[in-house]
Amino acid sequence: MAQTILKYALLVLAALSFVYPFIWMLSASLSSESGLGSLVLLPEGFTWTNYVTVFTKIPLGRAFLNSAFVAIITTSLVLISGAMVGYALARLDFVGRNAIFYLIIFTMTLPFQITLIPNYITMVRLGWVDTYFALIVPFALSSLSVLLFRQAFQGLPQSLIDAARMDGAGELRIIFQILVPNILPTVLTITILTFMGLWNEALWPLIVIRDEPTMTMPQLVTLFSVGGRADAQLGVKIAAAVMLAVPIVILYLFFQKHFIRSMATSGMKD
């Protein structure tokens, strides 16, 4: 009994250590500037002024639409490309299959900053700077999605594919109409992870986008916080950060059961 109580006490403390900063951020965004010094969970000097200031000083609505557009289109491309490549690596027999797979895994170890300059030069030469192409194309294929799709497809019976081929189904139909519906937790996991990463990406947009109407929400919030428009008002900066975090929190809460189930059941199969 004592061990159970101790276990749950430690779990509660761990959960609070992760949740408390976000709760404080939400509380601080609703507090007056003079009430930000105390780390309390309830707003001091409750006010909506910080949010009004954010929407007044920056085009947050347009930036939200830009981020949503880029994240949705890119996530869709990641799902399509990842499913096709993962299927080829899992079920098709060709020379160099394992070498290609291990090469893809190797790219996962490389930080994005290493390829930052080559990617930027490519965008300049293609004339894609200050366009949505620069925000979408470099992220349209994800090594993590390829890995997860490959592992999920390997867990499905070969008889399912053989039956579909006997019925005259092509490879694309096998992938998207027969196999993908059987691995929906994996699809949702890739969707959430990809969408979160794209939504929170600020470094790459800061490099390739200078036109304000094309800026994404993280980029605009970053420039707003460090560029002087917030006029050193900490509450306003925190309110902008809350607006950036809310869509991701809602997305995760909506899909958390599928996400946790997929992460718990997925395994590495040879």
Image (cartoon, rainbow, N blue to C red):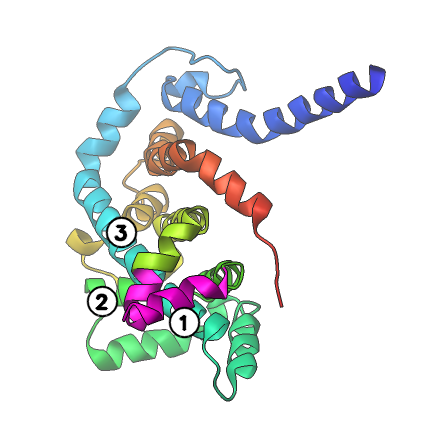
Closest to the observer, 65 or 179: 179
Specify the quadrant of the image occupied by residue 3: top right
Q: Which residue has dot 1 on it?
A: 85
Specify the quadrant of the image occupied by residue 57: top left
Give the residue displayed 55% in from the left and 46% down from the top: 263
Q: Are marks 1 and 3 in contact (CB under 8 Å)?
A: no
Q: Which residue has dot 3 on it?
A: 72
Q: Which residue has dot 2 on it?
A: 133
Give the structural element (helix, strand or loop) at label 3.
helix
**Which range of residues does the magenta coloring cover?**
157-176
Label 2 or label 1, whichever lies nearer to me, is 1
Residue 155's place in the image compared with 105, above or below, is above
Is residue 19 found left or right of 191 in the rendered image?
A: right
Q: Are marks 3 and 2 in contact (CB under 8 Å)?
A: no
Closest to the observer, 196 or 183: 183
Q: CA distance from mark 2 to mark 1?
A: 22 Å
The answer to whether residue 14 of the structure is visible from this angle is yes
Give the residue displayed 30% in from the left and 25% down from the top: 50
Give the structural element (helix, strand or loop) at label 1.
helix
The reply to whether the magenta stretch includes residue 172 is: yes
Three-letter amino acid code at the position of disc 2: Phe
In the displayed image of the protein, which residue is found farthest to the bottom? Answer: 95
Residue 25, horizontal then vertical, whole percent = 45, 27
Is residue 109 found left or right of 189 in the rendered image?
A: right
Label 3 Cα crowd, 10 Å radius (few <14 / some 14-19 / many 20+): some
Give the residue displayed 33% in from the left and 47% down from the top: 218
Our reading of the magenta stretch's main secondary structure is: helix
Label 3 or label 2, whichever lies nearer to me, is 3
The answer to whether residue 141 of the structure is visible from this angle is no
Residue 255, horizontal then vertical, whole percent = 41, 36
